[in-house]
Image (spheres, rainbow, N blue to C red):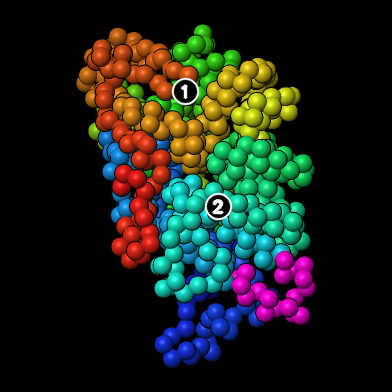
Amino acid sequence: MKQVILYSALIALSFSSCNTLDLNPLSEGSSETWYTNEDEIQMSVIRLFHQDFWKDVQFVGDQDLKDEYTDNFTRRTSLTAITNATINGQSSFVTSLWKRAYKNIAAANLIISNIQRTEGIMSEEKIAMYRANARFSRACMYGKLIFLYGDVPYYTENIDIDDFYSLGRTPKLQILEEIYKDFDYAIENLPVSYNSNSYQFATKGAAYAMKARVALYMGNYAIARDAANSCINLGKYELYPDYEKLFYPETKNSVETIFCTPRAVEQKIIFPDYVLRCQISRIIGGWNNGGPSWDLFCSYLCTDGLPIDESPLFDPHNPFRNRDPRLKATMAEFGSEYLGLIYQPHPDSLQVLNVKTGEFVENKDSRGVDQYASYNGLIAKKGMNESCLSYQVDPDNIVMRYADVLLMYAESKIELNEIDQSVLNVMNQVRARAYANESSYPVISTTDQNELRKILRIERRMEFAWEGTRYEDIIRWRLAEKVLNTPMYGMLDPESLRENVVNKGGWFFPEIPPIDEDGTVDFSGMYNKGLVKLLTNRKFDAPKQYLWPIPTTEILINSNMTQNDGY
């Protein structure tokens, strides 16, 4: 959905019921007097695509910090309710996501139920287009709900609050069939693109792509394959040529973006200051207190297409060298310029160069200077450039991009064991783009199902790191109980690091850690030798945590609502 939505009074538009006297204030919109012309329908549909409704499941409460619920992330020694297995029906993200999804569904249902008021005012084609946008949004919300919570209340009519709080849980597979119907209606009635430059809504491509995502997450591989293939065959999208610049704040509505919700500095809808500070180095006022894990760092293949424990190209003392280019686009390389300064976490690098001034400054990104610098030496840089130092940036919130569609198509075909040249083609397209500035890239050529499945999963992790898809992936692949029941490691404290690692020529990694077939890295050997530090132990309670709990408030106020097992 390429769009530049006009955020103004629309953001404040509410869909409240009438007051006790059944009087509708003439100065305010209400469900009794609204939905009577195209402007009102238009504003209502725009509201469905406000970014508050399209936050990833990884977001902690209302903070846009991605991947924190997964093995991609390390925040010093802190864990989340997901990664320490304390999630319950009162967890803030559990209740807030539920509320946001149902608020969107309620708004969509109001549009669908009332749009017939515009018959004779709008053409049938326009009515169908607006209705399709509402059904698209509703389908996406229900898709998110059944993935996270399982069986949930399902309704498609405009109902009052009392009726809602008497609804029981509808089986998720029954809801899934209705979700597909909504997507199919959207596919039939949405355009491939819009003529207006002022704002746009969902498109046919977005409906195909989101249908593919929901189907893939629910294990319906044939449906996912067909939807992804239909999106590809539209010929509307392509991979943006520069992987690193794709995520910069200045890159708007790229050729790769299929569905996004835009931000706008002038409307004070910006990328969260909190996340920027986590990714900005401590030298220039950032926190760098949460960033990529060593698990993620080790997942990036070498330039020969092999993992670091198999490739002769990997040098543990120069760990960024000979690696997939997406690594340097996602994390700041040691000794390289990052946001105008040299990033160097080495404990003996007490000063670093300010590239702009040519002067050396105190290196607060080294634990030799600042005890709260990154505990594992890594800092995230994906989507960051010097414009982010203003803390007032508005990159598009990309919900779906073309690379995801290509890899969803490949994964569906692999799981169906329909491996043909098209599978290799789409996977190689994604990998080749990463190596766009290189003379060659490691071509994927195997047709073995197990090997391709492994490569596909690694490819997704490298391609979408820090974009919020890792949580869904480890849940649907049933890997969470493995990768989230492993310790989180980091560097030794400065004096021990110098004595046991640096002075013995062991910086950065003293040894090459082994990696198993699921991409799980084992640092226990180095830990047992006193070469790395145990930061904390992650915990995932399976099978319980493969579903989130129903919010406690819903259980308390609705006698027909039941809780998921184990909560």
User: Residue at coordinates 44% horizontally, 68% vertically from top-left?
Assistant: 164
The residue under label 1 is 518
- The residue closer to the viewer here, 99 or 322, is 99
- Which is nearer the eye, 202 or 152? 152
Magenta residue span? 111-128
Which label number is shown at residue 174? 2
The question of residue 116 being in magenta is answered with yes
Residue 137 pos. (x, y %): 59, 58
Q: Main secondary structure of the magenta part?
A: helix
Name the secondary structure under disc 2.
helix
Q: Amino acid at mark 1?
A: Asp
Which quadrant would residue 289 be assigned to in this image?
Answer: top left
Point out residue 76 in the picture as x, y percentages from the top left corner.
29, 35
Name which residue lies at 65% across and 46% down.
209
Among the two numbered marks 2 and 1 on one chain, the one whose residue lies closer to the N terminus: 2
What x and y, as percent, mark residue 67? 43, 40
List x then y, in percent, for residue 454: 55, 23
The span from disc 2 to disc 1 (Cα, nearest Å) is: 32 Å
